[in-house]
């Protein structure tokens, strides 16, 4: 990749980080007009389409990226994330495991892999992978929230409360974590009450 294209990719990434996804998409499309084999442009394009929830376009861009470079951990991760967003758990797991082979112990790859495993029915394994991700990145609120949601679904309210409380200590304005914490506390109380009734 030449220096000019590299600068454009950096600019597309900056636009993405600023939430200016349509502009980033347009810039990536311009790059691809002059270089149809620019893997990084396809990755950026796919990532921005993901943010825009244009999943079919994300799939197309990311599959093209992987066709050009099967060993791109980022493209495999993004494709696995896209499959997860579509509820295609088996494809998500397969692709995220490939990403993990290419770039092992990356907290974000493990977060998505754990989430997909949990929702595919491999709950115990999913939680173990999410805990591994958390050990690698202890203040990552996305990991903390995903793990908390899994523990909530698994009725481990004490651990879920601990995780959502940690998120709120890091990000006091995190409304999702606040709502989940309230749900955990409510269900914990209800389950205790039900247990007393059954005893």
Image (cartoon, rainbow, N blue to C red):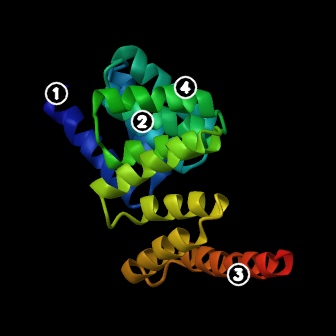
Q: Earlier in the sequence, mark 4 or mark 1?
A: 1
Discs 4/1, front? 4
| Side (left or right) of 199 relative to 139 | right
Residue under pointer 2: 77
Residue under pointer 1: 2
Label 2 to label 4: alpha-carbon separation = 14 Å
Discs 1/3, front? 3
Query: Measured from the top left, where is residue 48 in percent x and y?
Result: 47, 45
Q: Report if residue 42 is visible in the image.
A: no
Q: Earlier in the sequence, mark 1 or mark 3?
A: 1
Residue under pointer 3: 186
Structural crowding at the residue carrying mark 3, measured as other residues with C-alpha within 10 Å and reported as few (<14), some (14–19) or many (≥20): few
Discs 4/3, front? 3
Q: Earlier in the sequence, mark 2 or mark 3?
A: 2
- Residue under the image location 47 percent in, 75 percent down: 162
Secondary structure of the residue carrying numbered label 1: loop
Residue under pointer 4: 60
Label 1 to label 2: alpha-carbon separation = 25 Å
């Amino acid at each position: 990749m030449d220096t000019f294209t590299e600068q454009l990719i950096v600019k597309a990434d900056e636009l993405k980080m600023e939430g200016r996804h349509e502009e980033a998409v347009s810039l990536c499309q311009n790059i691809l007009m002059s270089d149809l084999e620019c893997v990084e442009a396809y990755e950026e394009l796919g990532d921005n389409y993901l943010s825009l929830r244009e999943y079919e376009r994300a799939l197309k861009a990311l599959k093209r990226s992987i066709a050009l470079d099967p060993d791109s951990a980022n493209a495999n991760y993004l494709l696995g994330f896209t499959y997860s967003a579509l509820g295609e758990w088996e494809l998500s797991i397969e692709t995220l495991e490939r990403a993990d082979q290419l770039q092992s112990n990356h907290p974000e790859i493990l977060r998505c892999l754990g989430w997909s495993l949990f929702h595919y029915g491999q709950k115990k394994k999913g939680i173990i992978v999410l805990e591994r991700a958390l050990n690698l990145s202890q203040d990552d609120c996305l990991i903390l929230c995903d793990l908390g949601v899994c523990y909530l679904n698994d009725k481990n309210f004490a651990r879920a409360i601990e995780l959502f409380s940690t998120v709120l200590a890091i990000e006091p304005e995190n409304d999702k974590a606040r709502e989940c914490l309230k749900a955990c506390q409510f269900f914990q109380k209800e389950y205790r009450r039900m247990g007393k009734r059954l005893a």
